[in-house]
Image: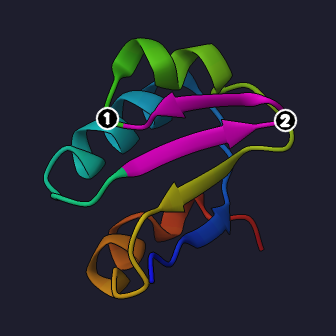
Amino acid sequence: PDTVTKIPISFHKPEDIIRFVDIVNHYDYTIQLVSGNSVVDAKSIIGAFTVGSADDLEVQVQDRECQDLLENLAEYVCE
């Protein structure tokens, strides 16, 4: 069955969003940014900027085994 890894994240400045999109584009996973009813492709710079300032932002990876990606995104993960 498809499993989804969900992680709350936040960006503090526009450069964070640009770097995030650059990181996720190095992976084959299907990755989305979700905020409320908005769901965007995390690999899209336009999409990421659309929801990037939301308070309830979450990254969803369509894979359970994505530890390599999560380690690279650690600086954006909400504690």
Instruction: Give the distance between the C-alpha atoms of the residues marked 1 and 2, in whole angstroms.
Output: 19 Å
Q: Quadrant of the N terminus?
A: bottom left
Q: Main secondary structure of the magenta part?
A: strand
Q: Is 39 a magenta residue?
A: yes
**Which residue is depicted at the point 63% across and 27% down?**
52
Segment colored magenta: 31-42
Q: Secondary structure at mark 2?
A: loop
Labelled disc at residue 59: none
Query: Which percent across, then down, holds residue 40?
Result: 53, 29
Earlier residue among tags 1 and 2: 2
> Which residue is denoted by mark 2 in the rendering?
36
Q: Is residue 30 left or right of residue 42?
A: left
**Which residue is depicted at the point 50% across and 25% down?**
48
Would you identify the image quadrant in which residue 6 lies? bottom right
> Which residue is denoted by mark 1 in the rendering?
43
In this view of the protein, which residue sits in the foreground, 27 or 78?
27
